[in-house]
Image (cartoon, rainbow, N blue to C red):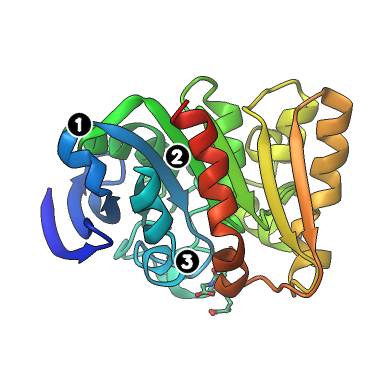
Amino acid sequence: METLSQHHCFGGVQGFYRHSAHSIGLPMKFGVFVPPQAAHGPVPVLFYLAGLTCTEETFAIKAGAQRLAAELGLMIVTPDTSPRGTGIDAADAAWDFGHGAGFYLDATQAPWAGHFRMETWVTQELRQLVLAQFPARADRVGLFGHSMGGHGALTLALRHPGQYQSVSAFAPIAAPSQCPWGEKAFTGYLGEDRSGWAAHDATELIKAGHKAPPLLVDQGLADQFLAAELHPHLLEAACAEAGQPLTLRRHAGYDHGYYFIASFIDDHLRHHARTLLA
Ligand SMILES: N[C@@H](CCC(=O)N[C@@H](CSC=O)C(=O)NCC(=O)O)C(=O)O
């Protein structure tokens, strides 16, 4: 693991790192905020999955999470959103597919399957690296994310029961099989056969009986992507039918961006802290 930069921040350290990711076959970058409490022993750790076009830096720079994370004693890991430098021409053809748009799954289709293995990287390789290299508690791991990363947080928690003790999302792509972003990504990464898509769709996973810890989801009602891409009402209906605990909060006036995330980040950190610090 190579240290790219480290910055003192609210008594802790915000760092950025790169490692040779075996699962991806390329170097991958990630950020880690280590709170001051980690000087005295391992602390709970939150993995934050960012959205389309973001990098490992976006949340660290824009969300304003470090102040309360330092107070509560929460580590925050911010993985990059896709492999980079894959040499696949089509990976740079659009902002919502390819580089910066890994969708937190392992692709099965050529030419993506070789490098686009974000699920294995996030849930196994990066998790193990962080637990080995930083003072993080293996038994207190939370997961949250935004938009594409909200989809990632929900689906990875549902697909890996027991691995995440707390889960939340900002404006997640809640039913990706039924929106243009998801249809494009799933067709490219998983293939035309829709029968394989449900295993990576939070609404469908919940309908199929998968369970996650109680979910907190925040959604802005002035979100420019709400009507076409996000479909929180489908997640809401599936959770109600399946008995999956969900707190879905709708906020008048808020859009899709990081001003929205910054406005409610404290609620998400406290949601995770209630479980991870109990
Ligand atoms: N095409 C635009 C918009 C991209 C965008 O809005 N990305 C969101 C996530 S959308 C779903 O995953 C985002 O988080 N952007 C980063 C930000 O700082 O707001 C573009 O290329 O910017």
Q: Amino acid at mark 1?
A: Gly
Front in this rendered view, residue 271 or 130: 271
Image location (x, y in percent) of residue 54: 45, 68
**Real-space Cα distance between discs 3 and 1?**
26 Å
The spot of residue 144 in percent (x, y) is 53, 46
Q: Position of residue 116 (x, y in %)?
A: 41, 49
Residue type, numbered disc 2 = Glu
- Dot 3 amino acid type: Ala
The label shown at residue 86 is none
**Circle 1: element type:** loop
Residue beneath disc 1: 41
Task: Give above or below for 274 relative to 58.
Answer: above
The residue tagged 3 is 63
Q: Is residue 17 left or right of residue 64?
A: left
The residue that appears at 63% across and 69% down in the rendered structure is 260
Q: Is residue 115 visible?
A: no
Residue 119: assigned label? 2
Q: Earlier along the polypeptide chain: callout 3 or callout 1?
A: 1
Q: Gap in Å between the C-alphas at discs 3 and 2?
A: 23 Å
